[in-house]
Image: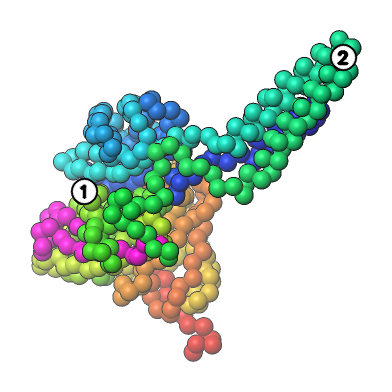
Protein backbone atom coordinates (compact mmCIF):
# COMPACT_ATOMS: atom_id res chain seq x y z
CA UNK A 1 0.00 0.00 0.00
CA UNK A 2 2.81 2.41 0.84
CA UNK A 3 4.39 1.75 -2.57
CA UNK A 4 1.08 2.46 -4.27
CA UNK A 5 0.76 5.77 -2.43
CA UNK A 6 4.29 6.79 -3.40
CA UNK A 7 3.63 5.89 -7.06
CA UNK A 8 0.46 7.96 -7.08
CA UNK A 9 2.28 10.95 -5.57
CA UNK A 10 4.98 10.75 -8.28
CA UNK A 11 2.32 10.64 -11.00
CA UNK A 12 0.71 13.78 -9.54
CA UNK A 13 3.97 15.70 -9.77
CA UNK A 14 4.86 14.47 -13.26
CA UNK A 15 1.50 14.80 -15.00
CA UNK A 16 -0.01 17.90 -13.37
CA UNK A 17 -0.44 20.76 -15.92
CA UNK A 18 -1.38 24.42 -15.39
CA UNK A 19 -4.65 25.81 -16.70
CA UNK A 20 -4.31 27.68 -19.98
CA UNK A 21 -6.52 30.28 -21.67
CA UNK A 22 -5.43 31.11 -25.25
CA UNK A 23 -1.73 31.97 -25.05
CA UNK A 24 -1.81 33.03 -21.39
CA UNK A 25 -1.01 30.77 -18.44
CA UNK A 26 -2.07 31.50 -14.88
CA UNK A 27 0.96 32.29 -12.74
CA UNK A 28 3.29 32.89 -15.72
CA UNK A 29 5.10 36.15 -16.40
CA UNK A 30 3.87 38.38 -19.24
CA UNK A 31 6.64 40.04 -21.29
CA UNK A 32 5.84 42.77 -23.83
CA UNK A 33 8.50 44.62 -25.84
CA UNK A 34 8.00 48.35 -26.39
CA UNK A 35 9.94 51.04 -28.24
CA UNK A 36 9.40 54.09 -26.05
CA UNK A 37 11.33 57.30 -25.37
CA UNK A 38 14.07 56.32 -27.80
CA UNK A 39 14.75 53.00 -26.08
CA UNK A 40 13.99 49.34 -26.62
CA UNK A 41 12.54 47.92 -23.40
CA UNK A 42 10.54 44.90 -22.30
CA UNK A 43 7.80 45.31 -19.71
CA UNK A 44 7.53 42.30 -17.40
CA UNK A 45 4.29 41.68 -15.49
CA UNK A 46 5.04 38.97 -12.96
CA UNK A 47 2.48 36.24 -12.47
CA UNK A 48 0.41 36.45 -9.30
CA UNK A 49 -0.94 33.60 -7.20
CA UNK A 50 -3.68 35.40 -5.28
CA UNK A 51 -6.11 38.28 -5.64
CA UNK A 52 -6.46 40.64 -3.84
CA UNK A 53 -2.70 40.70 -3.73
CA UNK A 54 0.50 42.24 -5.08
CA UNK A 55 1.30 42.63 -8.76
CA UNK A 56 4.98 43.20 -9.57
CA UNK A 57 6.00 45.05 -12.75
CA UNK A 58 9.51 45.75 -14.04
CA UNK A 59 11.03 47.34 -17.15
CA UNK A 60 14.03 45.59 -18.71
CA UNK A 61 16.26 47.90 -20.77
CA UNK A 62 18.12 46.62 -23.83
CA UNK A 63 19.95 49.87 -24.48
CA UNK A 64 21.89 52.28 -22.30
CA UNK A 65 19.08 54.65 -21.27
CA UNK A 66 20.62 56.07 -18.07
CA UNK A 67 17.91 54.83 -15.72
CA UNK A 68 14.89 55.87 -17.76
CA UNK A 69 11.94 56.39 -15.36
CA UNK A 70 8.72 54.78 -16.54
CA UNK A 71 5.39 55.71 -15.00
CA UNK A 72 3.08 52.74 -14.40
CA UNK A 73 -0.68 52.83 -14.02
CA UNK A 74 -2.79 49.68 -13.73
CA UNK A 75 -6.54 50.04 -14.16
CA UNK A 76 -9.18 47.37 -13.78
CA UNK A 77 -11.44 47.45 -16.84
CA UNK A 78 -14.36 46.01 -14.86
CA UNK A 79 -14.51 48.42 -11.91
CA UNK A 80 -12.13 51.25 -12.92
CA UNK A 81 -9.96 50.89 -9.83
CA UNK A 82 -6.52 52.39 -10.56
CA UNK A 83 -3.12 52.04 -8.87
CA UNK A 84 0.12 53.78 -9.86
CA UNK A 85 3.85 53.34 -9.37
CA UNK A 86 7.18 54.22 -11.02
CA UNK A 87 9.76 51.78 -12.37
CA UNK A 88 13.26 52.43 -13.66
CA UNK A 89 14.34 50.75 -16.88
CA UNK A 90 17.52 48.78 -16.33
CA UNK A 91 19.24 45.64 -17.56
CA UNK A 92 18.50 44.09 -14.16
CA UNK A 93 15.38 45.97 -13.05
CA UNK A 94 13.91 46.43 -9.62
CA UNK A 95 10.23 45.54 -9.71
CA UNK A 96 7.59 48.03 -8.62
CA UNK A 97 4.80 46.48 -6.58
CA UNK A 98 1.17 47.45 -7.10
CA UNK A 99 -1.90 45.96 -5.50
CA UNK A 100 -4.73 44.50 -7.56
CA UNK A 101 -8.13 43.74 -6.08
CA UNK A 102 -9.62 41.42 -8.68
CA UNK A 103 -8.85 39.14 -11.60
CA UNK A 104 -9.89 39.80 -15.17
CA UNK A 105 -9.10 42.43 -17.81
CA UNK A 106 -6.77 45.28 -16.87
CA UNK A 107 -4.89 48.04 -18.70
CA UNK A 108 -1.27 48.92 -18.05
CA UNK A 109 -0.48 52.52 -18.97
CA UNK A 110 3.21 53.32 -19.55
CA UNK A 111 4.57 56.87 -19.62
CA UNK A 112 8.14 57.79 -20.54
CA UNK A 113 9.80 60.59 -22.49
CA UNK A 114 6.51 62.25 -23.38
CA UNK A 115 5.07 59.04 -24.87
CA UNK A 116 2.20 56.92 -23.56
CA UNK A 117 1.25 53.33 -24.28
CA UNK A 118 -1.79 51.41 -23.06
CA UNK A 119 -1.23 47.65 -22.89
CA UNK A 120 -4.21 45.37 -22.25
CA UNK A 121 -3.62 42.26 -20.14
CA UNK A 122 -5.46 39.92 -17.79
CA UNK A 123 -4.78 39.14 -14.16
CA UNK A 124 -5.14 35.37 -13.92
CA UNK A 125 -5.20 33.13 -10.85
CA UNK A 126 -5.35 29.35 -11.11
CA UNK A 127 -8.55 28.21 -9.43
CA UNK A 128 -7.65 24.52 -9.39
CA UNK A 129 -9.95 21.85 -10.78
CA UNK A 130 -12.24 19.04 -9.79
CA UNK A 131 -9.52 16.64 -10.90
CA UNK A 132 -7.08 18.17 -8.43
CA UNK A 133 -9.69 17.84 -5.69
CA UNK A 134 -10.22 14.16 -6.50
CA UNK A 135 -6.50 13.41 -6.72
CA UNK A 136 -5.38 15.10 -3.55
CA UNK A 137 -8.60 14.30 -1.72
CA UNK A 138 -8.32 10.62 -2.63
CA UNK A 139 -4.70 10.46 -1.50
CA UNK A 140 -5.48 12.30 1.74
CA UNK A 141 -8.39 9.98 2.58
CA UNK A 142 -6.30 6.95 1.65
CA UNK A 143 -3.51 8.09 3.97
CA UNK A 144 -5.95 8.58 6.85
CA UNK A 145 -7.56 5.18 6.30
CA UNK A 146 -4.18 3.50 5.98
CA UNK A 147 -3.01 4.95 9.29
CA UNK A 148 -6.33 3.97 10.87
CA UNK A 149 -5.99 0.44 9.50
CA UNK A 150 -2.49 0.08 10.92
CA UNK A 151 -3.62 1.29 14.35
CA UNK A 152 -6.71 -0.92 14.27
CA UNK A 153 -4.65 -3.95 13.26
CA UNK A 154 -2.29 -3.26 16.13
CA UNK A 155 -5.30 -3.38 18.45
CA UNK A 156 -6.22 -6.89 17.17
CA UNK A 157 -9.31 -5.85 15.19
CA UNK A 158 -8.61 -7.49 11.83
CA UNK A 159 -12.11 -7.02 10.40
CA UNK A 160 -12.09 -3.26 10.92
CA UNK A 161 -8.47 -3.06 9.75
CA UNK A 162 -9.31 -4.83 6.51
CA UNK A 163 -12.25 -2.49 5.89
CA UNK A 164 -10.05 0.58 6.40
CA UNK A 165 -7.36 -0.87 4.15
CA UNK A 166 -9.95 -1.49 1.45
CA UNK A 167 -11.11 2.12 1.74
CA UNK A 168 -7.51 3.29 1.42
CA UNK A 169 -7.06 1.18 -1.70
CA UNK A 170 -10.25 2.66 -3.15
CA UNK A 171 -8.99 6.19 -2.50
CA UNK A 172 -5.67 5.46 -4.21
CA UNK A 173 -7.51 3.84 -7.13
CA UNK A 174 -9.69 6.91 -7.64
CA UNK A 175 -6.67 9.23 -7.51
CA UNK A 176 -4.70 7.07 -9.93
CA UNK A 177 -7.57 6.84 -12.42
CA UNK A 178 -8.06 10.62 -12.36
CA UNK A 179 -4.31 11.10 -12.97
CA UNK A 180 -4.42 8.75 -15.96
CA UNK A 181 -7.45 10.32 -17.60
CA UNK A 182 -6.85 13.99 -16.66
CA UNK A 183 -4.78 14.81 -19.81
CA UNK A 184 -7.86 14.03 -21.94
CA UNK A 185 -10.08 16.36 -19.91
CA UNK A 186 -10.29 20.02 -20.93
CA UNK A 187 -8.88 22.04 -18.02
CA UNK A 188 -11.03 24.71 -16.46
CA UNK A 189 -9.89 28.25 -17.29
CA UNK A 190 -8.24 30.30 -14.55
CA UNK A 191 -10.06 33.06 -12.74
CA UNK A 192 -9.97 36.18 -14.90
CA UNK A 193 -9.70 34.38 -18.26
CA UNK A 194 -11.55 35.72 -21.27
CA UNK A 195 -15.02 34.23 -21.82
CA UNK A 196 -15.30 31.55 -24.46
CA UNK A 197 -18.16 33.39 -26.19
CA UNK A 198 -17.94 37.07 -27.03
CA UNK A 199 -21.49 37.77 -28.02
CA UNK A 200 -21.80 40.09 -25.04
CA UNK A 201 -19.04 42.23 -26.51
CA UNK A 202 -20.76 42.43 -29.86
CA UNK A 203 -18.26 40.16 -31.59
CA UNK A 204 -18.66 36.64 -32.85
CA UNK A 205 -15.90 34.31 -33.92
CA UNK A 206 -16.50 32.18 -36.99
CA UNK A 207 -15.64 28.51 -36.98
CA UNK A 208 -12.52 29.26 -39.02
CA UNK A 209 -11.31 31.96 -36.63
CA UNK A 210 -11.13 35.71 -37.00
CA UNK A 211 -10.20 37.23 -40.37
CA UNK A 212 -6.82 38.85 -40.86
CA UNK A 213 -6.43 42.48 -39.89
CA UNK A 214 -6.10 45.21 -42.48
CA UNK A 215 -3.86 48.20 -41.86
CA UNK A 216 -4.04 51.87 -42.77
CA UNK A 217 -0.49 53.22 -42.52
CA UNK A 218 0.24 56.91 -42.24
CA UNK A 219 2.97 59.24 -41.03
CA UNK A 220 2.56 62.34 -38.86
CA UNK A 221 3.42 64.72 -40.44
CA UNK A 222 2.14 63.35 -43.75
CA UNK A 223 5.51 63.93 -45.46
CA UNK A 224 8.35 63.66 -42.94
CA UNK A 225 11.70 65.27 -43.70
CA UNK A 226 15.21 63.95 -43.29
CA UNK A 227 16.56 64.30 -39.76
CA UNK A 228 13.19 65.23 -38.24
CA UNK A 229 11.29 62.99 -35.87
CA UNK A 230 7.96 61.68 -37.14
CA UNK A 231 5.32 59.20 -36.00
CA UNK A 232 4.58 56.09 -38.01
CA UNK A 233 0.97 55.10 -37.33
CA UNK A 234 -0.82 51.81 -38.03
CA UNK A 235 -4.61 51.70 -37.72
CA UNK A 236 -5.75 48.07 -37.71
CA UNK A 237 -9.28 47.25 -38.83
CA UNK A 238 -11.29 44.05 -39.23
CA UNK A 239 -11.93 43.42 -42.91
CA UNK A 240 -15.39 41.98 -42.28
CA UNK A 241 -16.76 44.58 -39.85
CA UNK A 242 -14.59 47.66 -40.32
CA UNK A 243 -14.13 47.89 -36.55
CA UNK A 244 -10.74 48.51 -34.92
CA UNK A 245 -8.75 45.34 -34.30
CA UNK A 246 -7.94 45.36 -30.61
CA UNK A 247 -7.43 41.67 -29.92
CA UNK A 248 -3.75 41.19 -30.72
CA UNK A 249 -2.00 38.42 -28.83
CA UNK A 250 1.55 38.60 -27.54
CA UNK A 251 3.68 37.12 -30.33
CA UNK A 252 7.35 36.56 -29.46
CA UNK A 253 7.02 38.96 -26.52
CA UNK A 254 5.40 41.80 -28.47
CA UNK A 255 1.99 42.85 -29.72
CA UNK A 256 3.60 43.71 -33.06
CA UNK A 257 7.06 43.55 -34.61
CA UNK A 258 7.69 46.36 -37.07
CA UNK A 259 10.63 46.35 -39.51
CA UNK A 260 11.23 49.67 -41.30
CA UNK A 261 13.80 49.85 -44.09
CA UNK A 262 14.68 52.32 -46.80
CA UNK A 263 14.27 51.07 -50.34
CA UNK A 264 18.05 50.80 -50.72
CA UNK A 265 18.31 48.94 -47.42
CA UNK A 266 20.76 51.36 -45.82
CA UNK A 267 18.24 52.36 -43.15
CA UNK A 268 16.99 49.57 -40.86
CA UNK A 269 14.90 49.59 -37.69
CA UNK A 270 13.29 46.65 -35.87
CA UNK A 271 10.92 48.26 -33.37
CA UNK A 272 7.82 47.47 -31.32
CA UNK A 273 5.14 50.15 -31.65
CA UNK A 274 3.03 51.41 -28.77
CA UNK A 275 -0.69 50.77 -28.53
CA UNK A 276 -2.00 54.31 -28.10
CA UNK A 277 -5.70 53.61 -28.71
CA UNK A 278 -7.90 50.62 -29.58
CA UNK A 279 -6.60 49.29 -32.89
CA UNK A 280 -3.87 51.95 -33.17
CA UNK A 281 -0.11 51.34 -33.00
CA UNK A 282 2.47 54.14 -33.14
CA UNK A 283 6.23 54.51 -33.03
CA UNK A 284 8.50 57.52 -33.34
CA UNK A 285 11.30 57.38 -35.90
CA UNK A 286 13.85 59.64 -37.57
CA UNK A 287 14.88 58.97 -41.16
CA UNK A 288 18.50 59.57 -42.16
CA UNK A 289 17.96 59.76 -45.95
CA UNK A 290 15.17 60.83 -48.32
CA UNK A 291 13.29 58.43 -50.55
CA UNK A 292 10.95 55.48 -50.38
CA UNK A 293 10.62 53.45 -47.15
CA UNK A 294 9.02 50.07 -46.51
CA UNK A 295 7.21 49.00 -43.34
CA UNK A 296 6.57 45.30 -42.56
CA UNK A 297 4.50 44.50 -39.45
CA UNK A 298 4.27 41.01 -37.96
CA UNK A 299 1.28 40.45 -35.67
CA UNK A 300 -1.29 37.86 -34.60
CA UNK A 301 -4.94 38.11 -33.61
CA UNK A 302 -6.62 35.88 -31.04
CA UNK A 303 -8.23 32.81 -32.63
CA UNK A 304 -6.38 33.59 -35.86
CA UNK A 305 -2.96 33.01 -37.38
CA UNK A 306 0.10 35.19 -37.65
CA UNK A 307 0.24 37.62 -40.55
CA UNK A 308 2.55 40.09 -42.23
CA UNK A 309 1.29 43.56 -43.17
CA UNK A 310 3.17 45.65 -45.73
CA UNK A 311 3.05 49.35 -46.55
CA UNK A 312 5.25 52.15 -47.82
CA UNK A 313 5.81 55.86 -47.23
CA UNK A 314 8.08 58.61 -48.51
CA UNK A 315 10.58 60.83 -46.72
CA UNK A 316 11.28 64.18 -48.36
CA UNK A 317 14.50 66.11 -48.63
CA UNK A 318 17.64 66.54 -50.67
CA UNK A 319 19.84 63.43 -50.98
CA UNK A 320 22.76 65.56 -49.81
CA UNK A 321 20.89 66.06 -46.52
CA UNK A 322 21.38 62.42 -45.53
CA UNK A 323 22.66 62.27 -41.96
CA UNK A 324 24.00 59.36 -39.88
CA UNK A 325 21.55 57.79 -37.45
CA UNK A 326 21.75 59.06 -33.90
CA UNK A 327 22.37 56.79 -30.93
CA UNK A 328 19.21 57.97 -29.21
CA UNK A 329 16.92 57.10 -32.09
CA UNK A 330 14.28 54.44 -31.39
CA UNK A 331 15.21 50.92 -32.28
CA UNK A 332 18.44 48.97 -32.39
CA UNK A 333 21.62 50.37 -33.84
CA UNK A 334 24.10 48.49 -36.03
CA UNK A 335 27.72 47.85 -35.23
CA UNK A 336 28.80 49.78 -38.31
CA UNK A 337 28.02 53.18 -39.77
CA UNK A 338 25.70 51.71 -42.39
CA UNK A 339 22.74 49.57 -41.35
CA UNK A 340 21.87 48.36 -44.82
CA UNK A 341 23.37 46.99 -48.01
CA UNK A 342 27.16 47.47 -48.05
CA UNK A 343 28.88 48.51 -51.25
CA UNK A 344 30.67 46.33 -52.21
CA UNK A 345 28.59 43.54 -50.64
CA UNK A 346 29.93 42.32 -47.31
CA UNK A 347 31.00 38.70 -47.03
CA UNK A 348 28.79 36.58 -44.84
CA UNK A 349 30.76 34.73 -42.18
CA UNK A 350 29.83 31.08 -41.89
CA UNK A 351 27.51 30.97 -44.93
CA UNK A 352 26.99 27.39 -46.08
CA UNK A 353 26.83 26.84 -48.97
CA UNK A 354 28.87 29.86 -50.03
CA UNK A 355 26.31 30.55 -52.77
CA UNK A 356 22.87 29.44 -51.51
CA UNK A 357 20.43 27.79 -53.87
CA UNK A 358 16.85 29.05 -53.99
CA UNK A 359 14.44 26.76 -52.20
CA UNK A 360 17.13 24.88 -50.28
CA UNK A 361 18.17 25.44 -46.65
CA UNK A 362 21.25 27.57 -46.06
CA UNK A 363 23.13 28.07 -42.79
CA UNK A 364 24.32 31.45 -41.58
CA UNK A 365 26.70 31.39 -38.63
CA UNK A 366 28.00 34.45 -36.82
CA UNK A 367 30.45 34.92 -33.97
CA UNK A 368 28.90 36.54 -30.90
CA UNK A 369 30.68 38.23 -27.99
CA UNK A 370 30.43 37.04 -24.42
CA UNK A 371 27.39 38.22 -22.51
CA UNK A 372 24.72 37.67 -25.16
CA UNK A 373 21.30 37.52 -23.50
CA UNK A 374 17.86 36.54 -24.81
CA UNK A 375 15.79 39.25 -26.47
CA UNK A 376 12.18 38.74 -27.53
CA UNK A 377 12.44 35.23 -26.12
CA UNK A 378 15.28 34.22 -28.46
CA UNK A 379 19.07 34.31 -28.52
CA UNK A 380 19.26 35.89 -31.96
CA UNK A 381 17.15 37.09 -34.88
CA UNK A 382 17.74 36.93 -38.62
CA UNK A 383 15.69 39.29 -40.80
CA UNK A 384 15.90 38.86 -44.57
CA UNK A 385 14.46 41.20 -47.22
CA UNK A 386 14.51 40.90 -50.99
CA UNK A 387 16.19 43.78 -52.76
CA UNK A 388 12.84 44.92 -54.15
CA UNK A 389 11.17 44.73 -50.75
CA UNK A 390 8.46 42.33 -51.92
CA UNK A 391 9.63 39.62 -49.51
CA UNK A 392 10.50 39.72 -45.81
CA UNK A 393 11.51 36.72 -43.70
CA UNK A 394 12.24 36.48 -39.97
CA UNK A 395 13.74 33.42 -38.25
CA UNK A 396 15.38 32.80 -34.88
CA UNK A 397 18.46 31.27 -33.37
CA UNK A 398 16.94 28.51 -31.26
CA UNK A 399 19.99 27.60 -29.19
CA UNK A 400 21.14 28.94 -25.83
CA UNK A 401 23.46 31.96 -25.62
CA UNK A 402 27.00 31.03 -26.65
CA UNK A 403 29.96 32.13 -28.75
CA UNK A 404 28.23 31.37 -32.08
CA UNK A 405 24.82 32.23 -33.49
CA UNK A 406 23.48 29.80 -36.09
CA UNK A 407 20.45 30.32 -38.35
CA UNK A 408 18.85 28.14 -41.01
CA UNK A 409 16.93 29.86 -43.80
CA UNK A 410 15.60 28.92 -47.25
CA UNK A 411 15.68 31.80 -49.72
CA UNK A 412 12.55 31.55 -51.90
CA UNK A 413 13.93 32.84 -55.21
CA UNK A 414 17.28 33.60 -56.82
CA UNK A 415 18.60 37.15 -56.53
CA UNK A 416 20.23 39.45 -54.01
CA UNK A 417 18.88 39.63 -50.47
CA UNK A 418 19.54 42.12 -47.68
CA UNK A 419 19.93 40.54 -44.27
CA UNK A 420 20.41 41.65 -40.68
CA UNK A 421 21.41 39.54 -37.67
CA UNK A 422 20.39 40.94 -34.28
CA UNK A 423 21.25 39.96 -30.73
CA UNK A 424 21.33 41.64 -27.34
CA UNK A 425 24.27 42.19 -25.00
CA UNK A 426 24.31 43.72 -21.56
CA UNK A 427 23.62 47.30 -22.69
CA UNK A 428 22.63 47.33 -26.35
CA UNK A 429 21.10 45.51 -29.28
CA UNK A 430 23.67 44.75 -31.96
CA UNK A 431 22.67 44.67 -35.63
CA UNK A 432 25.02 43.20 -38.23
CA UNK A 433 24.01 43.84 -41.88
CA UNK A 434 25.15 41.87 -44.92
CA UNK A 435 23.96 40.77 -48.35
CA UNK A 436 23.46 37.30 -49.81
CA UNK A 437 23.42 36.40 -53.50
CA UNK A 438 21.20 33.38 -54.18
CA UNK A 439 21.37 31.29 -57.34
CA UNK A 440 18.70 29.20 -59.05
CA UNK A 441 18.69 25.43 -58.80
CA UNK A 442 19.87 23.35 -61.76
CA UNK A 443 16.30 22.23 -62.42
CA UNK A 444 15.09 25.83 -62.69
CA UNK A 445 17.77 26.96 -65.13
User: Picture coordinates of residue 379 (x, y %)?
Assistant: 47, 49
Q: Nearer the viewer, mark 1 or mark 2?
A: 2
Point 81% across, 28% down: residue: 166
Q: Answer left or right for 279 relative to 101.
A: left
| Local crowd size for mark 1, using a 10 Å CA cut-off: few (<14), some (14–19), many (≥20) | some
Question: Does dot 1 land on a helix, a strand or a loop?
Answer: strand
- Image vertical order of residue 398 relative to residue 16, above or below: below
Q: Which residues are magenta?
A: 209-234
Query: In the rendering, which numbered label is found on residue 276?
Result: 1
Q: How many marks?
A: 2
Residue that carries the numbered disc 2 in the rendered image: 157
Q: Is residue 9 above or below residue 261?
A: above
Q: Which residue shows up at 35% across the image and 52% down it?
A: 198
Q: Is residue 334 above or below residue 416?
A: above
As drawn, the label of residue 326 is: none
Instruction: Say whether residue 5 is left or right of residue 159.
Output: left
* Upstream in sequence: badge 1 or badge 2: 2
| Residue 372: in magenta span | no
Q: Are marks 1 and 2 in contact (CB under 8 Å)?
A: no
Nearer-the-camera pick, 236 or 20: 20
Q: Left or right: where does residue 204 sit relative to residue 81?
A: right
Amino acid sequence: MIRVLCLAAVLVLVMAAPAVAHNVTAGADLRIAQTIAGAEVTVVVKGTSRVPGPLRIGVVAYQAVAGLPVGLEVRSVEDGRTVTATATAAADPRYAELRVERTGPHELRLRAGGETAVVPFRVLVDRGSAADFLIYGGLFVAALLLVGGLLTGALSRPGTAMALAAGAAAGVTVAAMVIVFEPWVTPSPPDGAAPTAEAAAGATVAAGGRPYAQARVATVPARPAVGEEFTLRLDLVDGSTGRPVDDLTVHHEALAHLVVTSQDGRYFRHVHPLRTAPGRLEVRLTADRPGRYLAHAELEREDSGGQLLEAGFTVGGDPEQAVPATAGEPGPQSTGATAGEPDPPAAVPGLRPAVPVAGRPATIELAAPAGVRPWLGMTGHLIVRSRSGDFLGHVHEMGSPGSRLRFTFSFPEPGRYLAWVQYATGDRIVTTPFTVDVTASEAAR
